[in-house]
Image (cartoon, rainbow, N blue to C red):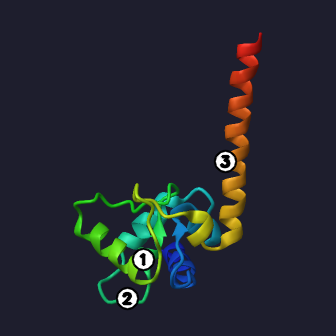
């Protein structure tokens, strides 16, 4: 088996009950920033009888990546709800509340807010000229 997959599984095993991590954060913690898709492939390659809590990994938008009609999406949502993870009405998980490790999402939220403020500032500057 791919040695990187083993590192991914090790990281995912460390995600505490009631918390989630994004594919990108798992990739970064496993030593390969930018390899989020590989994390998805590794989790989809898990055998049936495993101890990796795959359901605790979601996408960067805080959503389950399976389509809503997929049995895996229903199962993943049920497992997360059972652990206490809450979904907003639109179906996303608040990463600043449930994200692990929390400091990874604090900085991601802050950088997202800075980028939005910069875009807004540029738009306003264009209106003033």
Disc assigned to residue 112: 3
Q: Answer left or right for 91 relative to 23.
A: left
Q: Position of residue 58 (x, y in %)?
A: 46, 65
Residue 31 visible in the shown view? no
Disc assigned to residue 11: none
For marks 3 and 1, give the one nearer the viewer. Answer: 3
User: Residue furthest toward the top?
Assistant: 129
Calculate the distance from the C-alpha at mark 2 to the C-alpha at mark 3: 35 Å
Residue name at image x 39 percent, y 63 percent? 64
For marks 2 and 3, give the one nearer the viewer. Answer: 3
Quadrant housing the N terminus: bottom left
Calculate the distance from the C-alpha at mark 3 to the C-alpha at mark 1: 26 Å
Q: Residues within 10 Å of mark 1 (few under 14, many from 20)?
A: some
Q: Secondary structure at mark 1?
A: helix
In front here: 27 or 89?
A: 89
Residue name at image x 71 percent, y 15 percent? 127
Quadrant housing the C terminus: top right
Residue name at image x 68 percent, y 65 percent? 104
Q: Secondary structure at mark 2?
A: loop
Given contact means CB atoms under 8 Å apart, are the residues at marks 2 and 3 in contact? no
Residue under label 1, please give it: 54
Q: Residues within 10 Å of mark 2 (few under 14, many from 20)?
A: few
Residue 3 visible in the shown view? yes
Q: Answer left or right for 93 relative to 109.
A: left
Residue under label 2, please give it: 50
In front here: 123 or 75?
A: 123
Q: Position of residue 32 (x, y in %)?
A: 62, 64
Mark earlier in primary sequence (2, 3): 2
């Amino acid at each position: 088996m791919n040695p990187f997959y083993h590192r991914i599984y090790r990281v995912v095993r460390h995600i505490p009950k009631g918390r989630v991590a994004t594919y990108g954060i798992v990739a970064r913690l496993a030593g390969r920033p930018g390899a989020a898709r590989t994390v998805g492939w590794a989790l989809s390659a898990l055998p049936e009888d495993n101890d990796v809590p795959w359901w605790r990994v979601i996408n960067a938008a805080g959503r389950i990546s399976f389509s809503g009609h997929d049995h895996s999406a229903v199962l993943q949502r049920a497992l997360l709800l059972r652990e206490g993870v809450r979904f907003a009405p639109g179906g996303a998980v608040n990463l600043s509340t449930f994200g692990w490790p929390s400091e990874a999402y604090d900085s991601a939220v802050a950088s997202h807010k800075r980028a939005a403020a910069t875009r807004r500032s540029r738009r306003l500057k264009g209106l003033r000229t």
